[in-house]
Image (cartoon, rainbow, N blue to C red):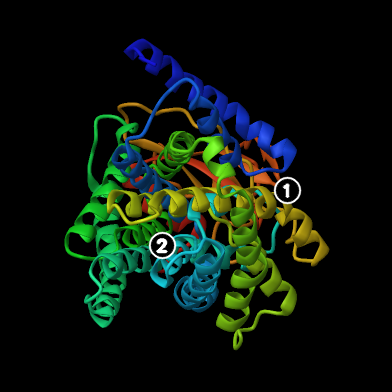
C-alpha cells in the first residue's frame, strides 16, 4: 500500500492526539499508557507497512535518552541517596540473575541453544525506566520503594545492554573472550557515572550563566546537553544511558535557572517521545506473528514474573533492610517496556538465527508484563500496606513565558529555620524588582499582600531577575549549603 507524505503527516497527527487521549483512558482502566500505544501501533499495521528496524532502533534510543533525562531531573537526590546501594545491586546482580533464570527457561520452552536462550533472557532482564516512571508517577506508593525502583530502572540499562551485546558476539564469534567483555562492562559503568557528573556540572554552569534571547530556549539547551552527554559518553566507550540518568539527577537537584520552564518542557517532550516510540515499535509486530509464540510467551512471562524476578530480588536484597512485603512489591514492579523491545532489534540487525522468534517473544512478554503487573501495582501496594502518606506536593502556578526578559519565577519552600518565617512581606529586605506573587499554604494557593505573614511550610512563588536569585534565597531561606 503506497502512503503519500500527506497521509504520513495525518497518521502522525493521529498518533499524537490519540496517544494523549489514551493516557486519560488508561488511567481510568488502571493500565499503563504504553500498552495502548503498542496496541495502536499493531493496529496501524493494517494501513502502514513499516519494517525499518534501524530507524525504529534509532528513534527508540533517542526516546530513551529523553525519557531518562526527564525522569532523572524529577528524581530527588535526598530520596534515592539512602537506597542507592540497593538500587545498584538490583541494577547489576538482580538483572544478571533474572536474565540467567529466564534464559534457561527460554532455552527449553523455545528449543533454543543455550546462548540463544541467554540472549533472550538478557534482553528482558532489566526493568524499564519508561514503564516504571509512567506507572509510579502520581501514585501514592511508599516513597522509599518508589525511589528504589526509579533508581534501579534508571541505572540497570547498562547491564542489559552489556549482556545482550556480549551474547550476540559470543554467538557470532564462539572464540570471543567473556572476561574481556566483563572488563568492558565495568569500564562502561565507571565512565557513565564520571562523565554524567562532569557534563551535568558543566550543563548547570552554562544554563545558569548564559543569557539567551528568550526563556523558551533554555529547555532546548538542557535537552541538547542530555543528548550530547549520551553521544560523548558512548563515543569514548562508556554507558551513554547511565551517563544521561546521572547527569539528569545532578541537573534536577541543582540550583537551576528557569527550572519550571525546563521541567515542563521535558515532561511534555518525554510524553511525545513515548507515544511515538511505543507506537513505532508496535508497527514492527503483527498480531498473527504473536500467535506463533502465544503459549511460549505466556509461559515465559509467568516464569519471569513469578520466579525469575522474585528469586533475583530476594537473593540480591538478602542482607538489606527491606521486609518481605517490600521485596514482594519490588519483585512485582519489575515492569518491561521499551528497552527490551529496542534491545530485541539488535539480534535482527546482527542477523542472529531465530531473531524473529526472539523479537516476537520479547514483545509478547513486554505486553503481558505491562498489562498484568502495571495494572495491579496499586492494588498490590494497598494489600501489602505499602501506600505512602498523602501526596504532599503543592500545586504550581501556571507559568507564563517571560519572553525576552531576565526574569523568572522561583518556587521555594520555607522551613522552621528559614529567616523569613514570622515576617510580613513588608518587613522582608528583598532585592529590588523581586515580588512574592503567590503562597501555597495547606495545599491552597493564596494571593499575598504586604501584611501576609510567612509561616513554616509555606511554598513561595517568587518573581525576580537572574542577578537577584541568590540574594532572594538568602533573605527567605538563609545561606544555602552547596
Query: Of residues 481 and 146, which is closer to you in this image?
Result: 146
- Could you tell which of marks 1 and 2 lies nearer the N-terminus? 2
Which residue does the image show at 23% across and 79% down from the upper left?
Answer: 177
Q: Which mark is residue 139?
A: none
**Residue 410: x, y in percent?**
46, 44
**Residue 320: x, y in percent?**
60, 84
**Residue 68: x, y in percent?**
42, 52
Crowdedness near tag 2: few (<14), some (14–19) or many (≥20) residues, C-alpha within 10 Å = many
**Residue 55: x, y in percent?**
30, 38
Q: Is residue 423 visible?
A: no
Crowdedness near tag 1: few (<14), some (14–19) or many (≥20) residues, C-alpha within 10 Å = few
The residue under label 1 is 442
Q: Is residue 205 above or below residue 186?
A: above
Residue 141, quarter of the rendered image: bottom right
Q: Quadrant of the C terminus?
A: bottom left
Q: Is residue 262 above or below residue 121?
A: above
Q: Is residue 298 above or below residue 4?
A: below
Query: Of residues 387 and 122, which is closer to you in this image?
Result: 122
The residue under label 2 is 157
Which residue does the image show at 63% across and 80% down from the upper left?
Answer: 314
Residue 190, quarter of the rendered image: bottom left
- Give the CA distance from mark 1 to mark 2: 40 Å
Amino acid at each position: 500500500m503506497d502512503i503519500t507524505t500527506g497521509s504520513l503527516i495525518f497518521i502522525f497527527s493521529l498518533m499524537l492526539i490519540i496517544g494523549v487521549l489514551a493516557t486519560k483512558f488508561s488511567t481510568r482502566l488502571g493500565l499503563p499508557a504504553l500498552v495502548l500505544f503498542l496496541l495502536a501501533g499493531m493496529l496501524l499495521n493494517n494501513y502502514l507497512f513499516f519494517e525499518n528496524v534501524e530507524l525504529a532502533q534509532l528513534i527508540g534510543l533517542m526516546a530513551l535518552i529523553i525519557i531518562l533525562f526527564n525522569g532523572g531531573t524529577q528524581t530527588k537526590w535526598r530520596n534515592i541517596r539512602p537506597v542507592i546501594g540497593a538500587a545498584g545491586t538490583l541494577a547489576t546482580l538482580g538483572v544478571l540473575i533474572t536474565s540467567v533464570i529466564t534464559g534457561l527457561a527460554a532455552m527449553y520452552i523455545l528449543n533454543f541453544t543455550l546462548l540463544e536462550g541467554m540472549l533472550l533472557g538478557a534482553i528482558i532482564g532489566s526493568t524499564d525506566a519508561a514503564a516504571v516512571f509512567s506507572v509510579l508517577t502520581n501514585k501514592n506508593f511508599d516513597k522509599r520503594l518508589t525511589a528504589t525502583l526509579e533508581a534501579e530502572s534508571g541505572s540497570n540499562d547498562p547491564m542489559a545492554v552489556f549482556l545482550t551485546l556480549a551474547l550476540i558476539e559470543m554467538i557470532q564469534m564462539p572464540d570471543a573472550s567473556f572476561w574481556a567483555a566483563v572488563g568492558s562492562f565495568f569500564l562502561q559503568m565507571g565512565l557513565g557515572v564520571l562523565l554524567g557528573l562532569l557534563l551535568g556540572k558543566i550543563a548547570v554552569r552554562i544554563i545558569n550563566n548564559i543569557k539567551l534571547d528568550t526563556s523558551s530556549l533554555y529547555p532546548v539547551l538542557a535537552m541538547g546537553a542530555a543528548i550530547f552527554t549520551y553521544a560523548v559518553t558512548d563515543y569514548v566507550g562508556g554507558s551513554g544511558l547511565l551517563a544521561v540518568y546521572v547527569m539528569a539527577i545532578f541537573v534536577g537537584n541543582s540550583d537551576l535557572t528557569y527550572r519550571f520552564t525546563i521541567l515542563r518542557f521535558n515532561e511534555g517532550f518525554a510524553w511525545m517521545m513515548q507515544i511515538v516510540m511505543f507506537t513505532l515499535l508496535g508497527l514492527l509486530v503483527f498480531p498473527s506473528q504473536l500467535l506463533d509464540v502465544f503459549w511460549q510467551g505466556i509461559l515465559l512471562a509467568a516464569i519471569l514474573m513469578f520466579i525469575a524476578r522474585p528469586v533475583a530480588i530476594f537473593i540480591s536484597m538478602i542482607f538489606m533492610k527491606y521486609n518481605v512485603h517490600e521485596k514482594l512489591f519490588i519483585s512485582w514492579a519489575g515492569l518491561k517496556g521499551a528497552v527490551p523491545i529496542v534491545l530485541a532489534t539488535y539480534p535482527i540487525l546482527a542477523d542472529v538465527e531465530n531473531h524473529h522468534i526472539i523479537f516476537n517473544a520479547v514483545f509478547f512478554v513486554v505486553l503481558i508484563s505491562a498489562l498484568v503487573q502495571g495494572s495491579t501495582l496499586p492494588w498490590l501496594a494497598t494489600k501489602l500496606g505499602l501506600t505512602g502518606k498523602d501526596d504532599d506536593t503543592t500545586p504550581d502556578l501556571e507559568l507564563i513565558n517571560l519572553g525576552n526578559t531576565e526574569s523568572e519565577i522561583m518556587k521555594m519552600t520555607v522551613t522552621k529555620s528559614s529567616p523569613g518565617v514570622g515576617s510580613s512581606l513588608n518587613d522582608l529586605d528583598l532585592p529590588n524588582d523581586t515580588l512574592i506573587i503567590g503562597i501555597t499554604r495547606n495545599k491552597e494557593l493564596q494571593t499575598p499582600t504586604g501584611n501576609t505573614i510567612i509561616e513554616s511550610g509555606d511554598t513561595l512563588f517568587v518573581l525576580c531577575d537572574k542577578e537577584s536569585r541568590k540574594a532572594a534565597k538568602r533573605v527567605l531561606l538563609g545561606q544555602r549549603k552547596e
